[in-house]
Amino acid sequence: MSRVLYSMMEWITRFAYINLLWIFFTLVGGFLLGLFPSTVAMFAVVRQWLRGSTDLPVFKSFWQYYKKEFLKSNLLGIFIYLISIIFIFNVFFLHANIGELLTWTSAPLLAGLLLFIMIFIYTFPIYVHYDLKVFQIFKNAFLTLLVTPIHMFCILISLIAFYIIVTVVPALGIIFGASFYSFIAMWFSLHAFEKIRQKQKA
């Protein structure tokens, strides 16, 4: 029992620590330039944990990934920022001109937004798991979504459940928000990648 408790506390500490690193290095990069390198570094470390390397030096590993992927991750970020701005502009435009978002005219936009969110969720796991160019990352995220929709459904349900908990206990979002998201997305993604690999071998 004490071993289980110790293991739980160890994982809680890991999540809190890497979440703190993510916040710090995002701010170091002036948020806009720090957000994507920090997120990639966090996913890379979480991936290592999930693959059994739980004793790696967290700060050193995080910093190495942050530096190494700074330019490429920000190139990815530029495209995601631009797509996000387009969606935000269209949502505000529809809301201002129609008054309600939940209408037939806004259905294609909302469907596109949902698709973009799901592709975005797979983007970082694919980034750190495969060695791909930026456009290939988006392509593979879309294909992974098509092949393994159940895994994405589980990710969304888990994130929605966590969001509900955070609305009750907001401090959890500050302490574990980013790290929990990366853990859930990476855990289900690794299972999705393995399923795809098995299909390719068959």
Image (cartoon, helix red, strand yellow):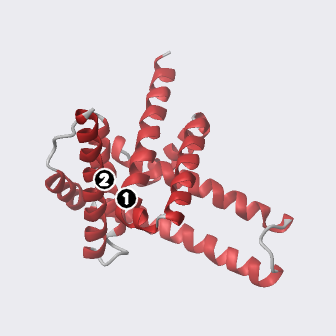
Eyeballing the image, is 137 above or below 52? below
Q: Residue at x 18, y 52 (%)?
A: 58
Q: Earlier in the sequence, mark 2 or mark 1?
A: 2
Q: Residue at x 23, y 55 (%)?
A: 65
Residue 114 location, quadrant: bottom right
Disc 2 secondary structure class: helix
Disc 1 secondary structure class: helix
Q: Which mark is residue 176?
A: 1
Pointers 2 and 1 in contact (C-beta within 8 Å): yes
Q: Please state which amino acid type lies under the numbered disc 1.
A: Phe
Q: Residue at x 56, y 67 (%)?
A: 83
Does the image show residue 86? yes
Q: Please state which amino acid type lies under the numbered disc 2.
A: Phe
Instruction: Return the x and y of residue 82 as percentages of the image width and height.
Output: 52, 71
Q: Which mark is residue 15?
A: 2
Instruction: Return the x and y of residue 51 as percentages of the image width and height.
Output: 29, 34
Q: Which mark is residue 109?
A: none
Eyeballing the image, is 108 above or below 199? below
